[in-house]
Image (spheres, rainbow, N blue to C red):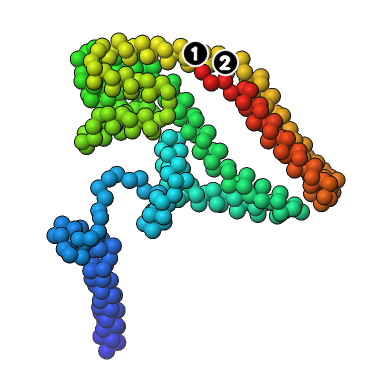
Amino acid sequence: MDALFYAFVVFLFAAVILGVEGAYLWWVGKHGAAARRVARRLQVMSGSPGRSGERISILKQRPYSRNAAFDRLLHRFNLAHRIDALLVQAGATTTVGQFLAFSGGCMAAALLLSLAWPLPPAARLVIALLGASLPWILLRRARQRRLIRIEQQLPDAADFIARALRAGHSFSNVLQIVGNELAEPLSGEFRIAREEINYGVPMNEALHAMAARIPLTDLRYLIIAVLIQRESGGNLAEILGNISGIIRARLKLVAHVRVLSAEGRMSAVILSALPFAVLGVMLATNPQYVSLLWTEPQGQRMLWQSLGMLVVGVIWLRKIIRIRI
């Protein structure tokens, strides 16, 4: 009797589990995300009246967020488009939504950190803004490093394209060869251009899109030379060889200028960081002595005036040491 009872309980438990699982699978198959996607595609293909008024976009559009509603909201703002352009130029894999979330997290962390000291609300706001600007600074530095790397690869790429053209390859095949043979990050951009051409994008538009992704004057010269040669003819290999020599000479001059301006750049960094370093040391050693700067009205005025003078000095030094070639 006991064995039959236990067997009945086991079979009943298994039947209940299988029934629940079967109901779950049926619900997912009928009302799940995959089922909704399939139903949506079938309605579009069949041209049903329920979908006749909806505009379907076939244009390639980078997602700004994994959430569909938030993605549509971000696409309405120009700031989101600018952030996405910076992310593309920096070679980052994060989306605009993730970047904004990281900026908000840094701002909240800086604000919580400022609560450890008796600071005025204006100072807390400045600290929070500085924390929010940290991801922007890191993103712009990553973008600058990537663009410098691409700029250094451009002479070799121009020579490579010129040699391939002399060997008898077509320009579309040259794009594929460059994308496979050169090092990153420039090879990836050539692969994207080649894939766009394979998908039916005209070569002019693909090259203009690459110039938009990489805002470098030297690359634009190279692309303009290719486009002019396609319209009017000429020896493209010789033109690219000349452009390669010009780019190498300009990079050599830029390196020479950076060496000559290294002392000024180091002085700018030291002078900009020195007030904050001294303030940090005094906060650690004698915080009551330094607290007069934000507890007394005269100290607050002095603090804001010194901050304004510091900002003006940093901008002035940046203008002096930044030499465009």
Q: Quadrant of residue 94?
A: top left
Mark 2 or mark 1: whose residue is earlier in sequence = 1
Which residue is labeled 1 in the image?
Answer: 252
Which residue is labeled 2 in the image?
Answer: 257
Residue 253 at x, y percent in the picture? 51, 13
Q: 298 or 88, which is in the foreground?
A: 298
Q: Is residue 230 above or below residue 94?
A: above
Where the N terminus falls, by quadrant?
A: bottom left
Residue 248 at x, y percent in the picture? 44, 13
Q: Residue at x 55, y 13 (%)?
A: 256
Q: Type of residue at label 1? A: Lys
Q: Residue at x 44, y 49 (%)?
A: 77
Residue 133 at x, y percent in the picture? 58, 43
Q: Residue pushed farthest left? A: 46
Query: Taking 165 as reference, is 244 left or right?
Result: right
Q: Secondary structure at mark 1?
A: helix
Q: Residues within 10 Å of mark 2 (few under 14, many from 20)?
A: some
Query: Taking 317 as reference, is 254 left or right?
Result: left
Q: Quadrant of residue 212?
A: top left
Q: Is residue 188 visible?
A: no
Q: Is residue 210 above or below residue 5?
A: above
Q: Residue at x 67, y 31 (%)?
A: 314
Q: Is residue 69 above or below residue 127?
A: below
Q: Type of residue at label 2? A: Val
How much space separates mark 2 and mark 1, taking CA atoms? Answer: 9 Å
Query: Taking 260 as reference, is 83 left or right?
Result: left
Q: Quadrant of residue 171?
A: top left
Q: Residue at x 29, y 44 (%)?
A: 60
Q: Is residue 138 visible?
A: yes
Q: Secondary structure at mark 2?
A: helix
